[in-house]
Image (tube, rainbow, N blue to C red):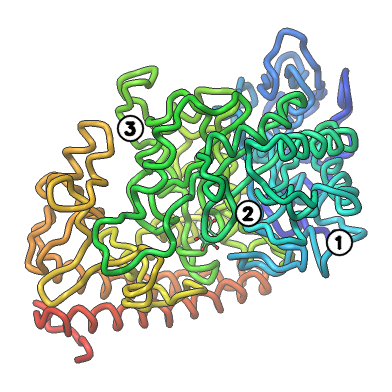
């Protein structure tokens, strides 16, 4: 089976892609493939018999491209081969969309990356689309076409970096940076390299002990510094274009510099120093918090942790370190404010991390198109005084530097359709498109993806569009209310369990009692998290009168009768959204059924079965949440709907 039959670039499978491999220097291709000819024929006007020319230009920027269509010649120009490749895919999109071919584009972000949480045994942490495409049984897969297909898929949306293994690096995976596993790394790096993608490996901070036989991983130890240098030299001897390392240190049980009384700048600089001569990057994650919190302690706040650890270290990192910051201050919930760390580390490289895999957003069983959520984060105005303009939105901050960018935890696996069901592909597509051009709207991206993925008439395209465009809002309605988060079953994080984490050690609480609910993160009476933002955000969140409704319970503990800006009480809002959310899912199911016979049966039935699961799960959420809060508050639904006592 050609795996591109199952995704948005299927329409171009005949395109003479081999001619577009990144070749060093010169023209990449001058003849039209049959597929491009076909697309051209479908156009009414002069493009029909055009000649296609790819040219490298010494004066053009790298990765950027220009497409011109003049006098029967379609010319793609770029400063490097990767730019020509991106130009080629953009040309295909434009031919397919029948729009003007002339365009000039440059990526908004230098680093456009995906992180895989794949383990050597082939399992994927938080993976919902089958086993790893890279590994099985403790080794790299052999005769593996998927990697090539994946690289092409990613290049078509402009991704230029991939980390292939889990950030939780066990002893076996720690060995990926040494032989014999390094041979497999090299092979994957070469395949990716043909598509302009740099390969990264997640490493274990304690590698000098695990692999090097040293007694310490202290970042100030001379032996440790030397070990990292030697190891990096070995890697770059084998793989000259290697991208670098990703590291999760002092987080959820992973080793880190704290064990040696060192801070995270010490830890990062020791390893980054070894990468520096090779011009490679160390990506250091900021997901550092106390995961052994006592639920009785109401002052420690996980939402503050990354900021408290990293903001004081601004400017202390080597040039080739980039701090990777999750989009929100806690952990990929369906609704969180943007992390306050963006804008607070202006003298440090920063990479924004999204979760494309749907750990907390329905695990690829529920339809949840995430672009609207990502847009909110990208557009969030940090008001950082260090921003170029007064506005300083996150997209401007991450787009500002050569070693800044965006990464996402990948949602793909070995499933024939890559993402468990076809509609979840829209998230991967949207992620890539937003890394390239964060100003695109969620609507534009979704329409484009639908047109490129299916062959539907306009009315049916609209049905599908309407199912997907508000699906994140729908998911939010029937799950944890008003930004409070969690309420999921512990461990696997699927389905409702209101108190699942309430008395646990992870620092994720809702504090519901008979009077009210929410986390007091205000400056005066709470954890002070709200006032770690720049003004006017700090006051906006800190003040209950100006805090947006959808984040009210993230920032404030309020009585159930508290009146929202919508005019409803908190308890009535909870009831209404949970009834509505379930009704919305029923509508999604009935709308999807209208597409029977219009989408191939395999895909259609696959999505249908997931929607049926979503319906069951949304009902569980509705009833458990409504009953829980009815029991706690004793306040009945104004509309007298069925709430189980
Ligand atoms: C979440 C997720 C973990 C993951 C962690 C991380 O907590 O549940 O599986 O390891 O994020 O981002 O490191």
Q: Tags 2 and 3 in contact by the CB under 8 Å rule?
A: no
Q: Quadrant of residue 291?
A: bottom left
The number of callouts visible is 3
Which one is earlier in the sequence, the residue at label 1 or at label 3? 1
Quarter of the rendering occupied by the N terminus: bottom right
Disc 1 secondary structure class = loop
> As drawn, is 530 to the left or to the right of 507?
left
Which one is earlier in the sequence, the residue at label 2 or at label 3? 2
> As drawn, is 403 to the left or to the right of 586?
right
Residue topped by disc 2: 167
What whole-number distance in Å separates the C-alpha atoms at marks 2 and 1?
20 Å
What x and y, as percent, mark residue 273? 68, 29
| Mark 2 CB within 8 Å of ligand 1 | yes
Name the residue located 55 percent from the left edge and 60 percent from the top edge.
253
Name the residue located 57 percent from the left edge and 71 percent from the top edge.
607
Quick one: 90 or 590, which is closer to the camera?
Answer: 90
Residue topped by disc 1: 141
Q: Is residue 467 above or below residue 504?
A: above
Pointer 2 local density, CA inside 10 Å: few below 14, some 14–19, many at least 20:
many
Name the residue located 21 percent from the left edge and 38 percent from the top edge.
538
Residue topped by disc 3: 382
What x and y, as percent, mark residue 10? 74, 52
| Mark 1 CB within 8 Å of ligand 1 | no
Disc 3 secondary structure class = loop
């Amino acid at each position: 089976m050609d795996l591109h039959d199952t995704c948005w670039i299927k329409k171009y499978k005949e395109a003479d892609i081999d001619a577009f491999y990144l070749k060093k220097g010169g023209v990449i291709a001058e003849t039209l493939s049959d597929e491009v000819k076909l697309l051209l024929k479908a156009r009414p006007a002069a493009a029909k018999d055009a000649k296609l020319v790819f040219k490298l230009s010494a004066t053009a920027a790298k990765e950027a491209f220009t497409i011109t269509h003049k006098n029967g010649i379609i010319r793609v120009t770029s400063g490097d081969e990767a730019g020509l490749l991106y130009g080629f895919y953009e040309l295909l999109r434009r031919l397919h969309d029948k729009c003007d071919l002339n365009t000039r584009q440059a990526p908004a972000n230098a680093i456009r990356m995906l992180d895989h949480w794949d383990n050597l045994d082939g399992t994927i942490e938080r993976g919902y689309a089958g086993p790893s495409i890279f590994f099985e049984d403790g080794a790299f897969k052999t005769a593996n076409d998927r990697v090539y297909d994946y690289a092409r898929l990613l290049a078509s949306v402009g991704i230029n970096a991939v980390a292939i293994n889990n950030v939780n690096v066990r002893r076996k995976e720690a060995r990926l940076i040494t032989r014999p596993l390094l041979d497999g790394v090299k092979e994957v790096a070469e395949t990716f390299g043909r598509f302009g993608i740099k390969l990264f490996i997640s490493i274990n901070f304690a590698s000098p002990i695990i692999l090097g036989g040293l007694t310490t991983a202290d970042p100030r130890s001379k032996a440790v510094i030397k070990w990292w240098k030697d190891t990096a030299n070995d890697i770059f001897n084998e793989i000259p274009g290697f991208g670098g390392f990703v590291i999760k240190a002092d987080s959820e049980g992973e080793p880190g510099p704290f064990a040696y009384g060192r801070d995270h700048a010490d830890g990062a600089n020791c390893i980054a120093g070894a990468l520096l001569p090779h011009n490679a990057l160390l990506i250091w994650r900021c997901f550092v918090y106390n995961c052994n919190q006592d639920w009785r302690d109401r002052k420690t706040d996980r939402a503050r942790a990354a900021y408290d650890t990293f903001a004081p270290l601004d400017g202390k990192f080597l040039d080739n370190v980039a701090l990777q910051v999750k989009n929100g201050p806690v952990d990929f919930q369906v609704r969180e404010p943007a992390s306050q760390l963006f804008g607070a580390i202006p003298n440090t490289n920063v990479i924004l991390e999204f979760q494309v895999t749907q750990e907390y957003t329905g695990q690829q069983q529920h339809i949840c198109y995430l672009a609207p959520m990502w847009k909110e984060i990208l557009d969030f105005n940090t008001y950082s005084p260090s921003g170029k303009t007064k506005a300083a939105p996150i997209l401007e901050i991450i787009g500002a530097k050569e070693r800044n960018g965006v990464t996402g935890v990948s949602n793909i696996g070995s499933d024939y359709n890559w993402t468990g069901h076809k509609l979840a592909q829209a998230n991967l597509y949207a992620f890539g498109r937003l890394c390239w051009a964060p100003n695109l709207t969620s609507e534009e991206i979704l329409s484009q993806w639908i047109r490129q993925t299916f062959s539907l008439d306009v009315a049916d395209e609209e049905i599908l569009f309407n199912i997907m465009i508000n699906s994140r809002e729908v998911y939010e309605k029937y799950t944890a209310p008003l930004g409070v988060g969690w309420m999921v079953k512990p461990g696997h994080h699927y389905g409702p369990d209101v108190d699942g984490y309430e008395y646990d050690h992870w620092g994720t609480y809702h504090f519901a009692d008979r009077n009210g609910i929410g986390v007091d993160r205000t400056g005066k009476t709470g954890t002070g998290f709200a006032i770690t933002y720049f003004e006017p955000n700090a006051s906006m969140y800190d003040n209950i009168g100006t805090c947006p409704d959808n984040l009210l319970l993230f920032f404030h503990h309020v009585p159930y009768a508290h009146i929202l800006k919508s005019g409803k009480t908190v308890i009535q809002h909870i009831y209404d959204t949970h009834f509505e959310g379930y009704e919305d899912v029923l509508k999604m199911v009935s709308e999807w059924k209208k597409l029977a016979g219009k989408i191939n049966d395999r895909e259609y039935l696959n999505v249908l079965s997931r929607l049926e699961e979503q319906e069951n799960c949304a009902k569980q959420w509705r009833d458990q949440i409504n009953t829980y809060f009815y029991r706690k508050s004793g306040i009945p639904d104004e509309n007298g709907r069925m709430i189980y006592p």
